[in-house]
Image (cartoon, coloured by chain):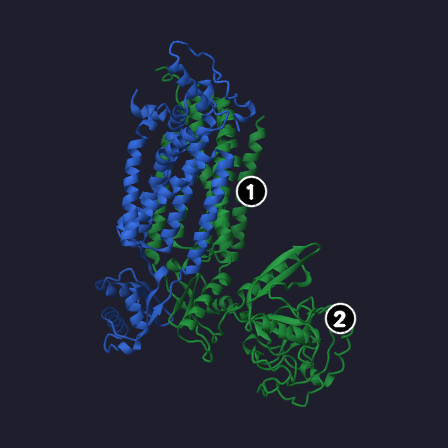
Amino acid sequence: MKQRFLTPLLTIVLVVAGLLVWSLVEGNSVLLGLDLKGGAEVVLEPSEDTELEGEELRDALDQSVEIIRNRVDGLGVAEPDITRQSNRIVVQLAGVEDQDRALDVVGQTAELRFRPVCGRIPAEQVDLSGENSATDSDNDGPVGIQPSDRDEASSEETSSMDGVETKEISAESTPEGVGCEDLGFTFTEALSMPTTLPEDDDAELPVILLGDSEVCVGQGECRLVLGRTMLTGAALETADSTFRPPEWYVLPIFRSGEDGIDLFNIAANQCFNQTAVCPTSQLAIVLDGVTESTPNVQTPYFERDQITISGDFDQERAEETALVLRYGSLPLEFETPSSRIVSATLGKDSFDAGVVAGIVGLAFVALFMFAYYRLLGVAAILSLALSGTMLWVILAWLSTSRSLALTLAGVVGLIVSIGTSLDSNVVYFEHLKEDIGNGRTLRSAVDRSFPIAFKTIFYANLASLIGAGILYFLTVGSVRGFALMLGLASILDLIATYFFLRPFVKWISLSDTLSSKPWLYGLPTQEVETP
Amino acid sequence: MSRLRRMYRNETSVPFSKIWTKVLLVSTVLIVVSAIGLFGRNLNLGLEFEGGGAWEVPVSNDLQADEVRDALRPLGLADARIQTGGGVLRVRTELTKAVQNQIDDAQEVDTVESITLVLAELANPDNPDPNSVSVSTAGPSWGDEITDKAVTALIVFFIIIALYITVRLRWEMAVGALIAVAHDIVITVGIYALFQLEVTPATVIAFLTIMGYSLYDTLVVFDKVRDNEHRLVNAKLDYREVVDQALNQVLMRSVNTSITSVLPVISVLVIGSGVMGAVTLREFALALLIGLLIGTFSSLFVAAPIATWLRERFGNEGADKGRSYRLSEAVKKRTSGSSISSPQPSNPSIPPRPRKNKRR
């Protein structure tokens, strides 16, 4: 008999203790937000040759702010401070103590580029003397090395880039330099050239980058020689991923007009016809020096919203690629960003005040619960400690993995949510009292009240969860963070109530010495029962 | 028996339905005042929403943010965002739109000028050089996109929650609950407008917290009402009496939950911002305090009466026992003398409600 409630009780306590130990061993800890602890700051200034001015530039910057926010704060909990200050963007990241890391995070916001794949070469950089050794393995994949016929302009990678080769495509909207024509080096030379570093990645020059696994079929790793950028992410409106059995697809949607789908169609036409501009019919999607995907172009002309990219995507890859397409494109090009460490805006005294106030407040709550519900109050406090521990483990994990940052408002919000989460205890206890007032014994009241009280708690929490879900999926920024916290609090409340409070109250109600003294439970006593 | 003891034992009998009208009058006045505040004075939106001015000056590394704050205090800018680091001091603060435009147009303005001078002096006390300070406008960090999305999400949220309550409980309760939530938000936001408290992102989160709390609280109350509906038949009560009884039963729960939620907030208010002087906490805690109290109040005095009145007026389900009971009561009055003793409704045009629906 005792097993029936002792087992779940022990299980939940052990599970939570295990989680706590895991969290401590992993070294997870909760990050404090910008207002409390400061962080690192990255300043982005538009590159000098941008043609935008005044209001247009400001709009482009504002748009960039939103895109950067989405990239650095996908979950909505990192609470970065991203502002436009006159003609630059200042990104402040909480809890980042080293400047390089800040640059890394923001650096992911580099321009998304579509480059034709000119050919594949082995991953290893080869010494020129051994040039024949590495060129054999190119027959098994869909793409082979196709040495350019016109390599007379061969010199160094960064050589003559005067954009005179635009004769084949006369449209004015053609990007400068055309794809794989006149790379400026031969494939044989490419073998010995280093992989292009992200900071040398210039839109108007060909690059050599590591290929992704889908394009390097049968080779393990390979490098790609990519032509000049045909179009950038600015041409994209949005992108999504979808599952059409048996495969996942990425669905990009381009902007209409000559800065959007027209640019893509020019590239698509070249690739489909395998002209010298795009000899392999593959168009690589490159973000910040990383090849994200290398789809084959299978038609010469596309409607802007009827494009699917296939490529043996699994769900994760498809969603990732869609994310890159959606947010990887800034409407502006920025100078190499600079970074520095910044102090907290509020400082430690505010944080201390919040913590002290929280502890005092919680002490009062515990005192109240104990005074009013006695032993049941102890159950409530233990249940609170349990859900509090779970919350801490989750927050610490999110801090470590998703750079969640706890701001002062967050601290206060947590304190409030703790006070509120006692509600489920109160609902249960009041129901118990009502039942006992109606003449039931403690034991039968415990058995009868829980399901009824839990139903109320469950449906009320379900409403909170629905609300949290809607807010989470439809919003960005700190509202999103709030929704996550609300949802977490609701779920933890349900878990603590069902798996801890229920067996615990049952357990103390079974003890004969205790249950003979109803005042211990803050319950109506027999002698005052008759008025 | 003392009133407190009766409360403790859940044996209160507050005639809620008798005082609803009076209390709703108070609510209406509060809402009108809030609306006047909102439309008359507008909200005092913080730097995060409206943007402001930004100053930057190279300083020696040992300059503390507190010193800067003290220096800016005479200008009324003690709440400016001040950051130091990397040998640079940065100050951000709210400015009116007009002043911002003047910065953009490189005009000189008194406030801007004086801030610049103060900072120049801080940077180099011996030889202040205003030209070392760069002044610019800062855009909002809480952009329009966040607001737009949040508003859309709230509308969807209201619709789905209304559907949820309709399916789970009753549509009258859905209307009551949503009006109660709106009531709480309007009054809290109205107080912010009236007293021109600064709205920061933290405040917005506080508003959302209040909304969630109010909704949760109302649902617990309505769940009790729904559970008690069988008494319409068994105890021959009319709907109003059933609601009254249910509200009395959840009264202590409402009071206790308010206490446990409000205690920490009062602690933040008194100890955090009062004793320890964390000014930033004050308004946030104030918003929460007002909102939490109003949230509890509105479940009992706004959501419940609205749901009850709607049900009395439109409770048109054929098997609605509350209505049929009242009908039979009316019959009783008309044909005075003939007694109606059956617990079943006597009006044959209204079939008894199927049993299985009773405890949904």
The amino acid beneath tag 1 is Val
Question: Residue B202 or B99: which is nearer the viewer?
Answer: B99
Q: Position of residue A309 (x, y in %)?
A: 65, 64
Question: What residue is shown at x 50% (from left), y 40% (from top)?
Answer: B163
Q: Quadrant of residue B125?
A: bottom left
**Mark 1 and mark 2: Cα distance apart in space:** 50 Å
> Which hue belongs to chain A?
green
Q: Chain of mark 2?
A: A
The mark found on residue B334 in the picture is none
Q: Are the residues tagged 1 and 2 within 8 Å (C-beta)?
A: no
The amino acid beneath tag 2 is Gly
Q: Secondary structure at mark 1?
A: helix
Q: Are marks 1 and 2 on the same chain?
A: yes
The mark found on residue A141 in the picture is 2
Location of mark 1 (residue): A15
Q: Chain of mark 1?
A: A
Question: What residue is shown at x 63% (from left), y 60% (from top)?
Answer: A318
- Examine the rendered structure and indicate whether residue A381 appears above or below residue B323: below
Question: What residue is shown at x 40% (from left), y 62% (from top)?
Answer: B141
Q: Quadrant of residue B110?
A: bottom left
